[in-house]
Image: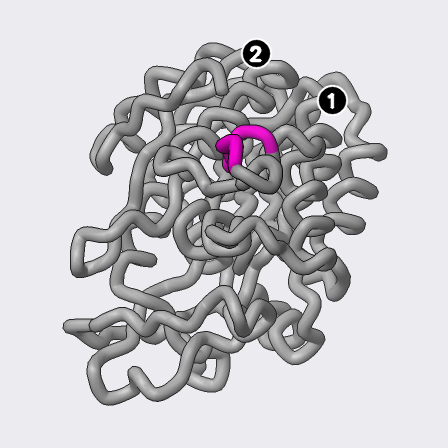
Amino acid sequence: MRRKSHVEKTVGPWAKQKLDALESYLEAYMQVMVKQPFKLFYIDAFAGAGIVKVRDKSNLASIDSEYALLPEAFQEQEIIEAEEFILGSPLRALGLSRPFHHYRFVDMDPVRTKGLDELIADYQVGDARALTGEANSVVQDIAKKFTHRLWRGVAFLDPYGPHLHWETVAALAGTGKFDVIINFPLAMAINRLVKRDGIIPERWQIQLDQCFGCRDWRDLAFGKDEGLFGDIQYKRTDAAAQLLGLYVRRLEEIFEVVAQPSLVKNTQGRPLYYLIWASSNRRGLPIANHILGLGEKVKVPRRG
């Protein structure tokens, strides 16, 4: 029985597309891998709560608490058209027809992890734990210990903003044993931090450096024109596409294969974020392409 006390504050209705894609991929992954001699791990790096409520017009007055971490970057409120309760990513993973052998759900909020531990008890799974801590540090620590030759896993990396560090993605890639599904929040967060006037607060610059693992985003997002009193910097009209291209190219440098990003839009048709699958094993690519292909596939620039 599900407990309403474990409901996340609210999400947009587009979250269902993301969560449905995740669940479909995990089901397909387990159908293939359960026949192999591997111990299978699932990591949810920004787990949140077990159940989420979809916003409607009556609760537009508040923005999700996660987005409040970047108040200046999230000032636009979207129009929401429906309300319902849906299972969040932890319960999607726990409720698979063929469960993983090991689960790790990570969240900074001890109230959430306590609630997840209570929900875990409702499922007949083996080793499942909710871990309280900063997601990047916890996942990097898991990756360091992920050395057994018969271990394999899937990591769902669904940050609330630009909070997923490149170092974390690289640590998972370095194991050679993980498929990763990344929510790359380009329009919801990253592109908003790249201000049109080029005056970006230092803390935002640090976040973007950590997200991309480099400073190349600066040169790709901005151009310069010669002016009477020196160069004038401006944000490129294709800045978002350039930033997406940079991220995908970086992934291609550390993983064997990367699927074409799948775009998720809001109810008004505006881009929000991209789901990106990457792996050190090419065998999962047809599955990823099929499932992510149910959304809108996006071609990305190959060079800046």
Question: For residue 247, what is the image quadrant?
Answer: top right
- Residue flagged by tag 1: what amino acid is it? Gly
Q: Is residue 296 left or right of residue 234?
A: left
Crowd class of label 2 (few under 14; some 14 to 19; many from 20; radius 10 Å): some
Residue that sits furthest to the front in the current view:
228
Question: For residue 39, what is the image quadrant?
Answer: top right
Q: Is residue 137 left or right of residue 212?
A: right
- The answer to whether residue 5 is visible is yes
Tell me what residue is drawn at x 66 percent, y 75 percent. 114
Location of residue 98 with respect to 150 vertically, above or below? below
Tell me what residue is drawn at x 26 percent, y 64 percent. 13
Q: CA distance from mark 1 to mark 2?
A: 11 Å
Q: Decide whether residue 50 is among the magenta residues.
A: no
- Residue flagged by tag 2: what amino acid is it? Glu
Q: Is residue 59 left or right of residue 248?
A: left
Give the x, y percent position of residue 67: 51, 69
Identify the residue under disc 2. Answer: 256
Location of residue 287 with respect to 96 vertically, above or below? above
Give the x, y percent position of residue 206: 73, 50
Q: Earlier in the sequence, mark 1 or mark 2?
A: 1
Q: Secondary structure at mark 2?
A: loop
Identify the residue under disc 1. Answer: 174
Location of residue 253 with respect to 3 vertically, above or below? above
Q: Secondary structure at mark 1?
A: helix
Please report the bounds of the magenta region as a residue range.
219-227
Q: Is residue 33 left or right of residue 172?
A: left
Which of 180/177 is in front? 180
Location of residue 229 with respect to 74 vertically, above or below? above
* Image quarter in which the N terminus is found: bottom left
Crowd class of label 1 (few under 14; some 14 to 19; many from 20; radius 10 Å): some
